[in-house]
Image (spheres, rainbow, N blue to C red):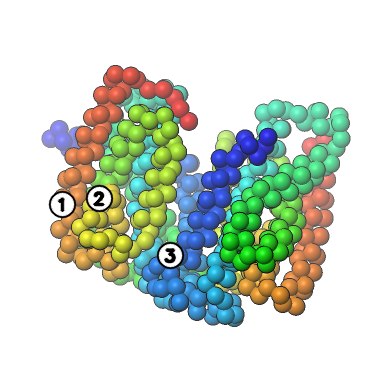
Amino acid sequence: MWFKRYFSDYLGLWLTQVGFAVGVLMTPAYIYGSQSVVSKAGELFGVKPAFTDLLVFSMVLSALLGVVTIIIGDMVGTLYYEFKIAESTVLIFEATGLTHYIVVNAVVRSIVNTLLSSIYLLPVLGALKGASGLIAYLVVVMILVPAGVTLGLLASIVGLSVIYFVDVRRPWSIAQLLPPVILASSGVYIPVHMIPLALRVVGYITPVPFVVETLQWITLLFNESRISQYLLFLTAIYAVYVSVSVLAINRVDRVVRK
Amino acid sequence: MSLVREVRRSLLVGYGMFRMHLTSYLSSTLNALLWMTLFLAPSVVFSSDPLSALLYLTPPVIGVNIVLLSIGLSQEYVTWLSEGGELDDLRLANLTLWKYVAATFPFDFLVVGFAPFLLSALLLSWYLGIAPTWLFRLNAALFALSIPVLMASGLLMASLIGLLYLKNPLARAVSQVIQILFVVVLFLPPRYLPEQYMALLVPGLVAVELLRASFGSNTISTSLLVSMTVPAVISYLLLSLLASRLVEKHFLKFGVETRY
């Protein structure tokens, strides 16, 4: 039902993601030739990739565009609808707690959204890398789903604070501004250390820069021992984010009850 | 004398429209800036010569933003504005679609065109550690020459898209495809053209090439570009006047309905 209703939106999103992935590589390749792009990227990341590897790399990282945009938009939109338009606050307080409702909402919706917004990778990776592309897809989804859940929790905090503590006439303008801020400050296609520090600090509020780094290494050096290190590191980061956001939502619950 | 009064009046109207749009302009400017950075930073980083890539890819920001904004303005005029009754006020003040887009152009050029270009140029230079002194290479004469061409192409796109919206129920999807095509065509240096004068066929391409030429990164030769400005401005203006006449005829015959 859900998928069918928003299918055209998702189609536009997948097209945008593929467009970004192709455009980022093809624009310099068109101006300077593809060989220079390969050598420059190899210089930046310290590996020697083929052009298909780079294409896989940019395609996988484009999935983050969809994950961040869709999850933040959907979270803030849903919470705004529930608390401002449908006014189901009292209903939620009677049935469960705010914390429970928000956490379940964030987790379930984010998982569905993450899977749907990155499913375009399945045919793309299958076409580019064959059977090993499917394994790569599973690994990427394994990393993206917890990232989506943490982002969903963070977005619920932002959404609640926008709804209750900020008085803006068009709250969705804030929700629209957040994804590009997060994405531009984590760089997505370029090494994270190249971004100016002031922007990077903004990005580190979310788990996105860590996910970007891990995905960059996984797609460029598949079958390496360093991947397990990165995964361990990422798990620790996820744990920190989840606990922080659950604590924050608990606080919101208390404030709202008063 | 009456021409001077007309210009003063439309500047005043443009300022009023600009005040009306201000919040959405600011948020969309910031939004466009960050998305552009997300796209342009990796493309510049992956090129073998970052400075020349900056010169190729940042000037089109002005052209793309102006063309997309004109499309948005005409879309607003023929679909949304009728809902709150603003359209009636505008039409009582004798503001047709053409005059509406023309009156808002001076302020739009500064805020939606030039400011994101300057900011993205500074931001990208900061990203890449290039000194932003390349901005001083600007050839002011060519830059100034590009402004009327940009205005004429914006007017042409606005009236054509307005006509499309009035005549075609599927216009929203079609205009999205057109917008994507424009972004692609205007960002790439026009080496794909079999003949250079064919740049006249795409409204905005001559203006974007002039902007590139003012930084010395043009593909079409400068003398040809300068000689193309006069036919470009005249033909775009004539075509846009024709299209806006058709829009007026449609308004008089059928009125407007609010659509989204």
Q: Quadrant of the N terminus of chain A?
A: top right
Can residue A178 be seen here? The reply is no
SS category of the residue bearing label 1: helix
Residues at discs 1 and 3 in contact (Cβ within 8 Å): no
Residue B175 position within the rendered picture, expressed as x and y whole percent measured from the top left? 40, 40
Q: Quadrant of the C terminus of chain A?
A: top right
Residue at the image position 58 percent from the left and 64 percent from the top: A128
The residue tagged 2 is B201
The residue tagged 1 is B230
In the image, B20 versus A122, the foreground residue is A122
In this rendering, do the residues under marks 1 and 2 share a single chain? yes
- Point out the residue furthest to the front here: A131
Q: Give the crowd class for mark 1: few <14, some 14-19, many >=20 residues within 10 Å.
A: some
Q: Which is more N-terminal, label 2 or label 1?
A: 2
Mark nearest the camera among 1 and 2 is 2
Q: Is residue A126 above or below residue B78?
A: below
Residue B165 position within the rendered picture, expressed as x and y whole percent measured from the top left? 37, 32
Residues at discs 3 and 2 in contact (Cβ within 8 Å): no
The residue tagged 3 is A27
Say the numbered circle drawn on residue A243: none
Three-letter residue code for mark 2: Leu
SS category of the residue bearing label 3: helix
Residue at the image position 79 percent from the left and 69 percent from the top: A232
Residue B103 position within the rendered picture, expressed as x and y whole percent measured from the top left? 29, 38
In the image, A6 versus B31, the foreground residue is A6
Which of the 4 image quarters holds residue B163?
top left
